[in-house]
Image: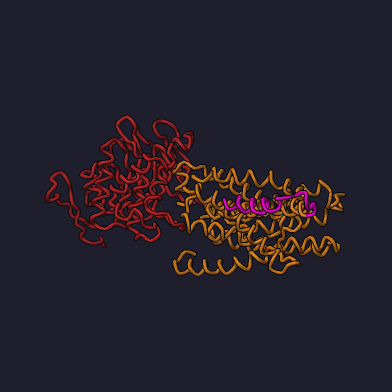
Amino acid sequence: MMMDADRVSVSIAGKSLLSQVSLQLRAGELLAIAGPNGAGKSTLVHVMAGIQGPSSGAVTLEGVDLRDWRSIDLARKRTVLLQSSELRFGFSALEVVLLGRTPHRGGGRSHDDYEIAAAALEIVDATHFADRDFRSLSGGEKQRVQLARCLAQIWDVDLHRPRYLLLDEPTSALDLKHQEHILTAASSYASRGAAVLAILHDLNLAARFADRIAVMCNGCIEEIGPPDAVLRPDLIRSVFGVDVKVIDHPHQRAKRHLISLGTTV
Amino acid sequence: MSVLSILAGPLTGWQIDPAADPIQSAVLNAIRLPRTILSALVGAALASAGAALQGMFRNPLADPALIGVSAGAATLTAFAIVAGPWMGLSTTSAVATWSLPIAGFLGGAVTTLIVMQLAQRGGGTDVATMLLAGIAVNAMAGAMTGLMVFAADDAQLRDITFWSLGSLGGATWAKVAAVSPLIIPCIVILPLNAGALNAFLLGESEASILGVDVEKLKRRIVVLSAMAVGAAVSVSGVIGFVGLVVPHLVRLANGPDHRTLLPCAAIYGATTLLVADTASRTIVAPAELPIGIVTAAAGAPFFLLLLGRGRRGGEI
């Protein structure tokens, strides 16, 4: 049960954004993607989401090419949190989350849909502004509500029904507490049987929450593996141009922590 | 419900003793009733199409008139009025009764497609470009209508002038019969897309992630709106602001959920146009003010108010 990108290349207007990227996203894992700006992270997520067609190569979900899936079946299995979503109409936060139930039988109107939406809002700590106009929320609050909408879309996950959650920078607008909160939620969602892929800029968050990290650079995956194996000073220096010192996490023995020492000259 | 009560009011009032005054009964049956029904149909068509187009463009300022649907419909209708006799059609014949709504629909559909095509930017519809393209298409359609005016004889000129200001004065049962098959299906089918339109408000990519076939939805909304507006324009002329203002009022009252918005917009659109038509008949009675003047006079200040609010909110 997995999502499989096989030698995927994307080029737009003659510019190569991804070249020959292969990546497997397995049920039960949280896979973090890190890399400098313009490395092709978002493009990879768009291709895996099926929003962007690959120029060559293919993405398969559970063995079937994404292009051969019926869009409604796909919508019940996988969801994507995109970076920027604007909304010009006055839906409340709860109504936005209910839109996540669009592909399901209740269509966002049934009693179950409301219960799921309420539970999803609870997960992202947004219950207290569920009735507020979405447009009046702060950037971070909007991001949490959009994440709740994504969770509501693929709510019914278990080991026999894997779900695929693709997150493009889910923590970019969040404060420290909610970064922790959201990634805890994402990793517990993964442990229930979902496959979670998240673009993260904060390598320390990736080190703590991800089962694997893929480091991208110039449209390629430089290295992929468990945080321990990937987060090495030499790789960080060559990809990001930043010197880091790697230490053990003071409370979580198995985890590593990176301290930036400044850019390399 | 308000539509029903308005319809039922004069009916019960007039028909207490129909045999006593055959003239009154004839006025009701041949003039008032088709006009009332046509007003309701046109109002419902404009408001439903406006609501659906605003959802599709994800912009509360999209109006059938603003993006060229009405102007395109008016142009082809004017063409049909002027060129009809050349092609051997009398404007009073049954063929003409049908040819005008069809011309209106085609004009509306073509202009909408042009505007949509021009506004395509990287897989999405760019709203600013859409509005600018609408202005250009409006101007072009205006020029072509002007050309028709130039070529028209006196009787045709009067017809075209009435069309450009909007009037329900020429309502007949034949016109009701001609536009009903175009307008009623639209009013019924548009709400079936409500869930998809709701998802669409999040953005095109988001809607496709939620399982909506985005391109198919856009095509369907454009065709249905052009059908409804084109047919409406062909019998009533260009009636502005109903398609813009009515959906807004419904959103203010009920929120932006298309599942309630689309049916409510149809009902309130019908009611609004009935009220506007009554006003147009009574303000300068016994003469009649073109209804387009009434809706524009009432709707334009509202539009400006929306613009002001939108700018303060940083929306436009």
Residue B108 visible in the displayed image? no
Q: Main secondary structure of the magenta part?
A: helix
Lateral position of residue A203 relative to residue B219, left or right: left
| Foreground residue among B157 and B20 | B20
Q: Which chain is red?
A: A
Residue A195 in which image quadrant: top left
Question: Which chain shows up in orange?
Answer: B
Could you say where residue B125 lies in the image, as x and y percent from the top left? Answer: 54, 54
Which residue is painted at 63% across and 43% down in the image?
Answer: B185
Q: Is residue B298 left or right of residue B280?
A: left
Q: Is residue B21 magenta?
A: yes
* A194 shown above or below A16: above
Give percent across and percent down for residue B196.
Answer: 50, 45
The front one of A217 and B5 is B5
Q: Residue at x 69, y 52 (%)?
A: B38
- Could you say where residue A75 lies in the image, as x and y percent from the top left? 43, 39
User: Which corner quadrant holds the C terminus of chain A?
Assistant: bottom left
